[in-house]
Amino acid sequence: MAICRQFRTGRAWNAACGGQVADASGSWLMDFTGLTKKFPNNRPLSDFEREHRLLQKKRLDVPLLAQLCVVTMNSRTLVSVDRWYAYRGYIALLGLIGVAFAVGGIAMLAWILLIDKAPNENGIWEAIFFGIVMFAGLGVAGAWVARKELFRWTYYPIVLDRKTRQVHVFRLDGTVLSAPWDTIYFTLGRGTGPVGAFNWDIRGLILAEDGVTVKETFAFCITTGEIEHAHSHWEFLRRYMQEGPAAVREAVLYCMPLERRPESFAVGKERIFANDAHAPAFMYLTMIPFNYVHALARWLVMRTSKVPVFPPAIEAARRPEPDDPYVFDASMNPEDLR
């Protein structure tokens, strides 16, 4: 394990999980649908959602794919990471790059004006002031983008409660959506990546009393270019709720160490590199410098954000019984990834 991480950071998690980080073939699959662009609500069900509906009581004959989603699991509850967790820090990085360019540009123009004492002729001062205004606008835009992740929440957990048959979703604004598992309309969705690639995901739709109007939407953690991977992750979640932890225990080899604490730099770096674990060697090596910068931005996001906490009743339900044989948490990880 240590040797694997030493030479191919990120492949330790992926290889030990049977290559279960779906479509970890490079960063082009980054997809922040639902975060940068909200899911469409207050609308009727689409034909696509009807065609790709996922039924709670229909067993799919597919391999199970945990997708490194589990934070904790026991006989009563499973806590999953959110749809954007795998690439946490990327949006903040883009925004901070914009801020850095803005600060550098303003500093350069201020130096020309104040230190080099550019003459007030041929419109030079006007051009400098216009440039400062343009860079200031870039800085404001960059800060707005970075704020999508900075000073928010370390992640947005989803709790599956087998005992009460409830799903609890930590919303972006810190409130909690609770809905009965058996009444949620589950379906596949399509997100859009940065280069126009349409990615499959798994969405839960909260319908109005008429049974056709979508009031609210949430999504589980997977975004993938292969519909088979989406089905495999859905089946992992479905079997946990319908059949119990014994049916999925073999698929959970690691837990994300996020319980009541922010993610460490080492864990964030490992998770970022895991996204490229299936990439060709040249692409993997090319991404190493960017991934380390990404890891720094991710660490900053984690350090500036609050740890999500559910209401007391939900938090109490998450605690396992003393004799529960199916308790999974980060203590099962390698020592440096706990």
Image (spheres, rainbow, N blue to C red):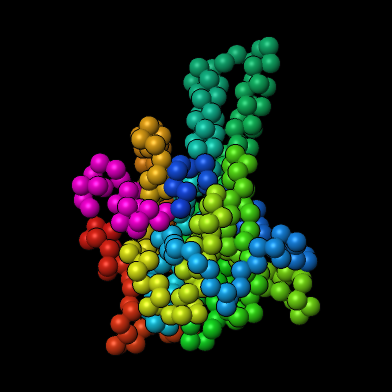
Relative horizontal placement of residue 169, taking residue 38 as reference (left or right) = left
Residue 182 in percent (x, y) is at 60, 80
Pick the residue in front: 80 or 114. Answer: 80
Q: Which quadrant of the figure contains the C terminus? A: bottom left
Q: Which one is nearer the viewer's eye here, 280 or 265?
A: 280
Q: Quick check: 122 left or right of 314?
A: right
Quarter where residue 166 is shown:
bottom right
In front of the other: 120 or 161: 161
Judge whether 105 appears above or below 302 on screen.
Answer: above
- Residue at the (62%, 47%) spot, across then down: 198
On screen, 6 above or below 47? Answer: above
Residue 60 point in image, percent of width and height: 53, 68
Where residue 270 sits in the image (x, y, percent)? 34, 51
Q: Is residue 177 above or below residue 127?
A: below
Quadrant of residue 187 within the rendered picture: bottom right
Nearest the camera: 171 or 252?
252
Q: Is residue 304 magenta?
A: no
Which residue reaches farthest left? 3
Count of numbered circles in the view: 0
Q: Kindly identify the residue that appears in the image at 59 percent across and 32 percent down.
A: 135
Q: Is residue 10 magenta?
A: yes
Q: Judge whether residue 297 can be spotted in this image.
A: no
- Residue at image location 50% in from the left, 38% down from the top: 97
Q: Residue at x 38, y 45 (%)?
A: 277
Residue span colored magenta:
1-21
Q: Is residue 89 left or right of residue 133?
A: left
Query: Extreme top residue here?
Result: 122
Q: Is residue 196 left or right of residue 220?
A: right
Outermost residue, front direction? 61
Q: Is residue 62 visible?
A: yes
